[in-house]
Amino acid sequence: MQTNVLIIGASGGIATALTEQLLNDESIAHLVTVSRSAVPSQAAKHRHVIINSQNEDEIKAFVQEQKGQYKFHRVICCTGILHAQAEPVLKPEKRLEDMRPEQFIEYFKVNTVVPALWIKHAIHLVDKAHSSIVVFSARVGSISENALGGWYGYRSSKAALNMIVKTAAVEYARRSANTVLICYHPGTVDTDLSKPFQANVKPEKLFTPAFTASQLLKHTANLSPEASPYYLDWDGKTINW
Ligand SMILES: NC(=O)c1ccc[n+]([C@@H]2O[C@H](COP(=O)([O-])OP(=O)(O)OC[C@H]3O[C@@H](n4cnc5c(N)ncnc54)[C@H](OP(=O)(O)O)[C@@H]3O)[C@@H](O)[C@H]2O)c1
């Protein structure tokens, strides 16, 4: 079967690897990538659209433009932020005193609101016969598995994203019953996002974006809609919410 895929946040490390693998996959008929910046279009089946997903009007315009065209079998939202040097500066909190309102707001804008907006509008984009929506969560977003503490803003923005997905899954079950929703933890991946935090990661636990992309494509294919939503790690194992 020929399928169509939409990747959001396409300039990132994991998204770039996903794009490369999907372009080499002959079963993909259309690959659309979305990013705030340009991504070279590498094949006839690839279309890139510049969208700042923090502006909902730009998402709406994309959905409008897509109307009457093909539907997507996979929507993968790769947006996320952990640290930033430019304003607003982001540095994961180590202690209570590090919590800052402006940092919380930025984490929630990028890690929670952007994927939530895409989940909102994807109801008009997905193939209702068979499709999946993957958002990148993180294991640190698990409320029940939080033993280490710290990273208040990043953790809570991912936990909130998990709740958005849990809640949306109830509505998708009514409105698009064959669409599977997945919160995905890729492991620690060698991208800009994890660079400042790689020192204590064992080499065998620091994954390449290529490995991460192939694990995701493998583990998120053919999941049963009845058990949606899923919270999965890089190895296909369930994480407790
Ligand atoms: N790398 C890891 O070890 C790791 C571990 C656990 C979870 N994750 C999650 O996996 C996902 C992908 O991460 P990655 O490692 O590929 O990170 P990355 O290379 O830093 O890419 C992150 C993407 O997020 C988008 N983004 C960043 N800041 C944004 C902003 N202010 N407004 C809107 N979009 C923004 C960008 O999309 P544009 O293309 O639009 O610029 C960028 O492509 C993230 O959600 C991350 O939290 C990663």
Image: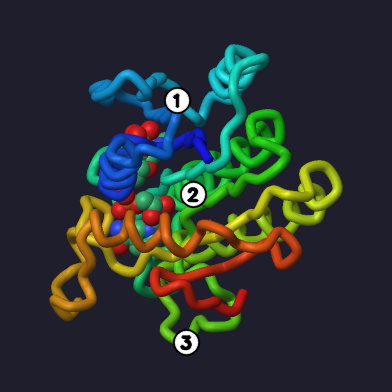
Q: Secondary structure at mark 3?
A: loop
User: Residue lying farthest front?
Assistant: 1
Residue at screen point 45% across, 25% down:
52
Dot 1 or dot 3: first in sequence order is 1
In 3D space, how far apart are the residues under numbered discs 1 and 2 (Cα atoms)?
14 Å
Query: Which labelled disc corresponds to residue 235?
Result: none
Give the labeled residue for mark 2.
111
Give the labeled residue for mark 3.
147
Dot 2 or dot 3: first in sequence order is 2
The three-letter amino acid code for the residue at tag 2 is: Asn
Residue at screen point 66% across, 32% down:
121
Measured along the vertical axis of the image, is residue 214 above or below residue 84?
A: below
Q: Secondary structure at mark 1?
A: loop
Most foreground residue, 75 or 82: 75
Most foreground residue, 59 or 31: 31
Residue at screen point 35% across, 36% down:
10
Beta carbon of the mark 2 residue lies under 8 A of ligand 1: yes
Q: Secondary structure at mark 2?
A: helix
Horizontal placement of 6 versus 190: left or right? right
Dot 1 or dot 2: first in sequence order is 1
The three-letter amino acid code for the residue at tag 3 is: Ala
Local crowd size for mark 1, using a 10 Å CA cut-off: few (<14), some (14–19), many (≥20): some
